Image: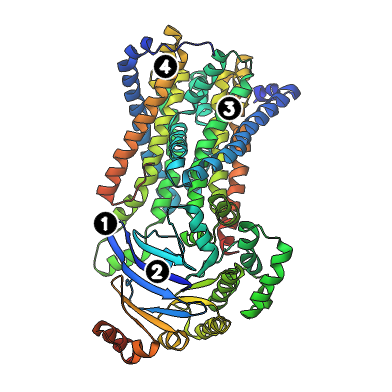
Amino acid sequence: MGELAELLTYYNVIFLLKGMGTTFALSALGCILGGLFGTALAVARLTTGPLTLPLRALALVFTEFFRRVPFLVTLMLCFFIFQFSGLDVSTFTVGCVTVVLIGTAFLAEIVRAGLQSVHPNQWHAAETMNFTLLQTIRYVVLPQAWTVILPPAFGFFILFIKDSALASQIGVIELTYVGKVFNNRGFSAGVSFGVILVAYFMLSYPLSRLGAKLEKKLGSSRTR
Amino acid sequence: MDYTFQYGQVWPYLPYLLKGAWLSLQIAFLAFCGGMLIGTACAAVKTFGSGWMRHGVNAYVVFFVNTPQLVQIYFLYFALPDMGIFLSSYMAVLLGMTLNAGAYLTEIQRAGFESRRQSEMEAAEVLGFSRWQQIRYVILPHVAKVLFPPLSNHYILMTLGTSMAAIFGVEELTGRAFNINSETFRSLEVFSIVAVIYVVVTLVASVLLALFGRFVFRAKMRVV
Amino acid sequence: MAHLELDNISAAYGKLRVLDGIDISVGSGETVGLIGPSGSGKSTILRVLTGLLKPDAGVVRVGGAPINFDKPAEIRRLRDRAAIVFQQYNLFQNLTVLENVMIAPTKVRGRKPKEVRPEAEHLLAKVGLADKMDSYPDQLSGGQQQRVAIARGLCLKPEILLLDEVTAALDPELVSEVLDTIRGLAEDGMTMLIVSHEMGFIREISARVAFMADGKVVELGAPAQIFDAPEKERTRDFVGKILRH
């Protein structure tokens, strides 16, 4: 207990909060950019015709690959690619690239499931009125798919906060790294990592409650 | 990029890597089994129990679900020795993954229990089924069918989750990748091969589980 | 020259042949009714005419000009000239009634909203829904939604209107309001191909009626012939069963 008080000095708390901020930023960036790219991938997979076959194949391979490779391995690949490319980037940048790659893959699946949840009749009606695929998605399907996409996307965001802990391995100063620093400075592991666990909890739990509320609201407002 | 790929140096390690993959699957499996035991017991408490037992289970689940597995293992690995409990890396990882899995599997199984259909049970009761027969012939088949897809999916996630064991020195697939990397310095080659092994292994596992699910439980499952 | 012509059209879904040598022509301003048991291919004809299904034999002509189904540009032109109203109204749930009617002319054809709006409002008034312009589809009854779908089709200023069992999904008391709307369109001289099982209505409104079964046109003639004095036995069977009540 006394050790906890020793740990929670002003500067340590600031450091802790910065770590929390970095963790949050990594996850948010991964989800926002991942959402944009993922939507593009999802739309690409919905195109028809032989011309776009390579695009569809690429989207499928990308999505399956980055969903089936562990965070740590993707992180290492990005780390070494940057290292050998000679580009001098920060570890945070490497972490960002990693989270965007993985976020894109997962969100592509979530968006695709959402788009396909819109009744085929809506697609057909747009088609017979000469909407292009992009117009159909933009004006008819995506507005209706939101309520199906948002809850799992938000859920993924919360999950990602926990996954990003692995970025500490390359030295990104996020929350887990802060714990290791505290431990290295001489605080006991129990207190150091205990505080970190509580910090993660304080990030994750309110968001998951929010997510549950969101899901209820969207579920009931499905028919406006 | 100034890097010449030399896969030739890494290919000989393939059997070594595949043995690592097998270890990953084993760790995931053991943790899954342990998690199932915990999960079934806790889900039963949450569905049928009351009072402080229920609150205890809730606290356990909420805590482990809202904190990262990596930090949970850090805590166990570094903090337990301070309390006089000395676990090997393998045991610490296994324990951490089991406790983590237990929380998620509690939630999955609780949803499964709650999917039991009152009307079917009443029908069985009226037909003269004993409580035990009701469970065996009416509830269990349905609940097993409902549970199989999310449980399979979680097992796949856990297989990917074993990768963080490498951080603690466990020589599963990712751990062996680190070993090879420090011997040959062929980082991109080894991690790209390892990434592909993860993809292939999880794809094969997904297909096998999907087939099993379709034939045994008649549960419709998607692989890709 | 017929306005719309199906010349020996055949089509299939994979191995299943759904249309076999269909010959139907619709003159300008004429209404042709399509009747027959389910699975006879009536709705499939409309799917071909809207480019949702490609025929594997035969020619479709609009105003004498054949349509090449391999060219997306020609399918687009076909859809510009022939608008379809579906049985399941298929209104866009995320848009208001007025937006539903305006969206294709503005977004797809690129016309200015200022131009399209008065036309849309006029059409909605014509189908009796002027007061529902800002409502959403799920706030309307089935009959109202179907009328919006008709207004939406008309806003595209088609030469030909295709109606696919538009009263089939409606409660009986809502059917007549939709039939009245269609009647009005016929009086205005719209070229129409109507698939329906409202026999009385088909009889009253059609210049000619085609009876279909198993993907073929069994008999094509004036309503009086098809309903009162069918030449083919199959037709007689069907009409007899239908009109018995």
The residue marked by circle 1 belongs to what chain? B
Q: Is residue A197 shown above or below C12? A: above
Quarter of the picture containing the C terminus of chain B is: top left
The circle on residue B132 is: 1
**Residue situated in front as seen by the camera: A80 or B8:** B8
Residue A118 seen in the figure = no
In the rendered image, which residue does mark 2 sit on? C6
**Residue situated in front as seen by the camera: C104 or B18:** C104
The residue marked by circle 2 belongs to what chain? C
In the rendered image, which residue does mark 4 sit on? B190
- Label 2 environment density (alpha carbons within 10 Å; few <14, some 14–19, many ≥20): many
The circle on residue C223 is: none
C-alpha separation, residue under disc 4 versus residue under disc 1: 54 Å
C-alpha separation, residue under disc 2 versus residue under disc 1: 66 Å
The circle on residue A97 is: 3
Under circle 3, the secondary element is helix
Q: Quadrant of residue C240?
A: bottom left
Q: Residue A154: x percent and y percent? A: 58, 44
Amino acid type of disc 2? Leu
